[in-house]
Amino acid sequence: RIVMITSGSLGQEIVSSIHKLRQVISIYVYCVDKQRHKLWANKFPKVKAIITQVDELISCIKVDHNILKIVEEPLAINIFTTGTSTGGVNGQFIFSQVLIDCLLRLKSTSKDQTELITICKKVYEGNTFEMTNLHEFENKYSPTKALWCYTRDTFYKAINAVLRSENIHMIFLFRQFISDIQHQLKENQVKFPIKVYRGQMISSDELKRLKEHCEQFISMNSFISTSTDEQQARVFLSVPNGAVDLESVLFEIEADPSTVTTKPFADISQHSEYPGESEILFMPGSIFRLESVMQSSENSIWIVRMKLCSDDDHHLKKVLTHMKQQLGNEHTNLQTLGRLLSDMSKFDLAERYFVRLLEELLQNDPLRIDLYQDLARVASQTSKFDQCMEWRQQAIALAEQTEKGSHN
């Protein structure tokens, strides 16, 4: 990946030769006579700007770098096919929705924050820049800075990788940060219908999958950064990257705030590290109707048109409502999360959160009886029958002890 800055005269001589090199992703012409060098530079798509001021040059490179990261950032897409069962692909779609809802309703604790920082410090050990950011996060982070933190080129960006990979425990640890972003998005919710764009490189297989599911519902597991400026979203889509299995895609998204129920979207430019960008951010799990997938007649870019849906206006409403009611509308705790994970057949994680809650409770807390029973069921599901009996015996013993105490 090479970003090249050249003078006008040198650029006129060498750009025609280096433009075809795969490693060169963008070229900036830094010169005195902007109009003169526009004449030759406009013939080359990789020439992103002709600039006369150094501050403008630095700002332009920063903004373009951020756009390029979005283009190359993979998307994790879930598809809901109407008219089929809630098993398989649809089950994955529904559980992803309910899991995010459950995690965001769980209150974060100091133990969670300490564990998150400890893990991040291990990952970034030896990286002075990121260790400084972690120290700042640990000591100075405020919920009102969540969006600004998210847009910074630091470890905060790891949150999308965590969401895409569905690393449930890391999402669990990051949930307060995700919740703070959600709160700020609600505060800055777009007020009028809007059309936004996102340039994206996706695999040929993923494109084929999208083409096969037009008129269906899709959601993406991560935050979705988009732009109100179509040309800005397209800026890196024409760059050859040497990977034959990747396709250039421009997502066109229509979003009406009147449809929003639980997942807001907002213009975050006033809170961004890059205030010059017109960035609209959507929450993880936002649901869209996939309207069409067509190739542009003027170039090889695929246009994917989508429309934002609410939880109330699609075939998922009854299923999502039922599952969320099963979680409970008032109090969500680690037992709720554990039971959801057990329903998803993620038994190791379910056990982890049941035990985590046990460690927080007093020895005579009646909730422990339910947790012992939950742990017994998980052990039974994983054929750990001796362990299952041990948990059941603990449940019986505590139930008897509690009953005696109530008679006294």
Image (cartoon, grey):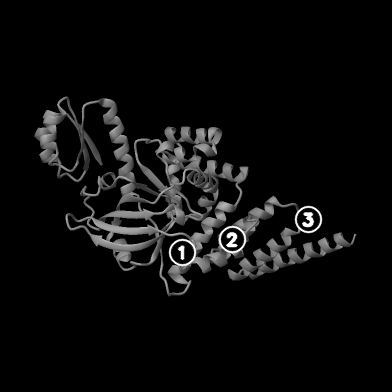
Give the mark nearest the N terminus, 2 or 3.
Answer: 2
Disc 3 marks a residue whose amino acid type is Asn
- Element type where label 3 sits in the image: loop
| Towards the viewer: 81 or 6 | 81
How far apart marks 2 and 1 lie (CA) works out to 32 Å
Q: Quadrant of the C terminus?
A: bottom right
Tell me, for residue 390, which label it has, or none: none
Q: Nearer the viewer, residue 108 or 265?
A: 265
Question: Closer to us: mark 1 or mark 3?
Answer: 1
Location of residue 377 in the rendering, given as x and y in whole percent from the top left corner: 64, 68
Q: Which residue is mark 1?
A: 313
Q: Position of residue 304 (x, y in %)?
A: 30, 58
Q: Residue at x 28, y 29 (%)?
A: 56
Q: Residue at x 32, y 61 (%)?
A: 206
Q: Quadrant of the N terminus?
A: top left
Q: CA distance from mark 1 to mark 3?
A: 46 Å
Task: Please tell me how crowded label 1 is: few (under 14), some (14-19), or many (20+) other residues with Cα within 10 Å.
Answer: few
Identify residue type, mark 2.
Ala
Residue 91 drawn at (x, y percent): 48, 68
Say above or below: 324 vs 122.
below
Q: Residue furthest right?
A: 408
Which residue is under mark 3? 364
**Residue 148 at what x, y percent from top left?**
45, 37
Mark 1 residue element:
loop
Q: Nearer the viewer, mark 2 or mark 1?
A: 1
- Of 30 and 19, nearer the camera is 30
Q: Is residue 285 visible?
A: no
Q: Which mark is residue 350?
A: 2
